[in-house]
Image (cartoon, rainbow, N blue to C red):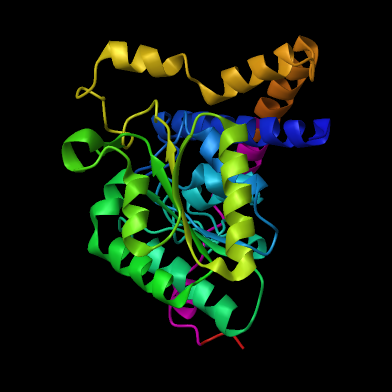
Amino acid sequence: MEKAFYLDALRLMLNSRNFEEKTEELFKAGLIHGTTHLANGQEACQAGLCLALSDKDWIVPTHRCHGFTVCKGSDPTAMFSEMFGSSHGLAKGLGGSMHMPDKEVCNLGSSAVVGSGVPLAAGIAFYFKRNKINNISVAIFGDGATSRGSVHETMNLASIWKLPVLFFCENNLYGMSASSSDMISIKKISDRAASYSMPGVTVDGNNVLEVYEACKKAVQYIKEGKGPYFIEALTYRTKGHSKSDRRLYRSAEEEAFWEKKDPIKNFENYLLEEGLFTEEEIEEEEERSKTGINLMAEKALSMASDCLTEEETMALVYAGEEK
């Protein structure tokens, strides 16, 4: 792979991390209301997947959606605007942190309902198959969602109809405050794929190259018309489930263990060891990303008072079907 690829991977992960850190800062300052679900530590999953997709492949993320939205190509200014409730947001300020659709980059958007995006991703895949379009959709969900009936029903139907859908499970080891080891009866979630006659693999979700290679293989398999594919990416969220979660259910030793597996730091070390980048180049990218995200947040904040009127909101809510 060329240096440009590694640079793209680094930039996507840095932008995702810096977006989350800026979001947390804005919440603590009382500038964003409601709640949010940060994905610090899961950047390799987001970047690795999106790098393996084409521009016309669709994603349907979870409520922990910021990183995937950034990596699929959405404008962070519009994302910050969405959380400010501004009309400049991806959903014109009506969706907030957990609902960020962006059809311009083939992102259907997420929902606060766990696992609810999985059937929607299958619906997109059904459209592709019915119209002989050689693209795929990606159903993104967490370990907690794998015990929901809608996920299993969708996997079964996707297998029967050989739909072009990738089931991408981000296993960050916790569903809210419940450890997945206490809630799931098998050691590897990917083993469930065999029940639906589809390939299932488990990868290191903190290794962006491993995630990318697995997703690239899956995309090729699906686009060859062989049916759906299942990937379980083992990762870890360093923050709580939501902004009010103090993480009292896990130990300092556990968090220290996973801190050493930080996907960005480990990738940067790899780039240095392989002689692909110098320390100065990496520092420049870190600074460029942080500065850029901060500037986009400031721009969004300057427009935060631009909100839809009640009439404009109702017109959107009750709008007819687009032709």
Q: Position of residue 228 (x, y in %)?
A: 48, 63
Who is closer to the viewer here, 28 or 47?
Answer: 47
Q: Residue at x 62, y 88 (%)?
A: 323
Number of marks:
0
Q: Position of residue 143 (x, y in %)?
A: 32, 44
Q: Residue at x 82, y 34 (%)?
A: 2
Q: Quadrant of the N terminus?
A: top right
Q: Is residue 19 visible?
A: no
Dividing the picture into quarters, in which one does residue 161 lie? bottom left
298 within the magenta span = yes
**Residue 195 relative to residue 302: left or right:** left
Question: Magenta part mainly helix, strand or loop?
Answer: helix
Q: Is residue 65 visible?
A: yes
Vertical arrangement, residue 243 with respect to residue 132, above or below = above
291 within the magenta span = no
Vertical arrangement, residue 166 with respect to residue 38, above or below = below
Who is closer to the viewer here, 256 or 316?
Answer: 256
For the record, the magenta segment spans: 294-320
Q: Position of residue 179 (x, y in %)?
A: 22, 33
Q: Position of residue 148 (x, y in %)?
A: 24, 58
**Residue 191 relative to residue 18: left or right:** left
Dividing the picture into quarters, in which one does residue 110 lie? bottom left
Vertical arrangement, residue 238 with respect to residue 54, above or below = above
Q: Residue at x 52, y 52 (%)?
A: 82
**Residue 179 relative to residue 281: left or right:** left
Who is closer to the viewer here, 319 or 240?
Answer: 240
Q: Residue at x 58, y 48 (%)?
A: 215
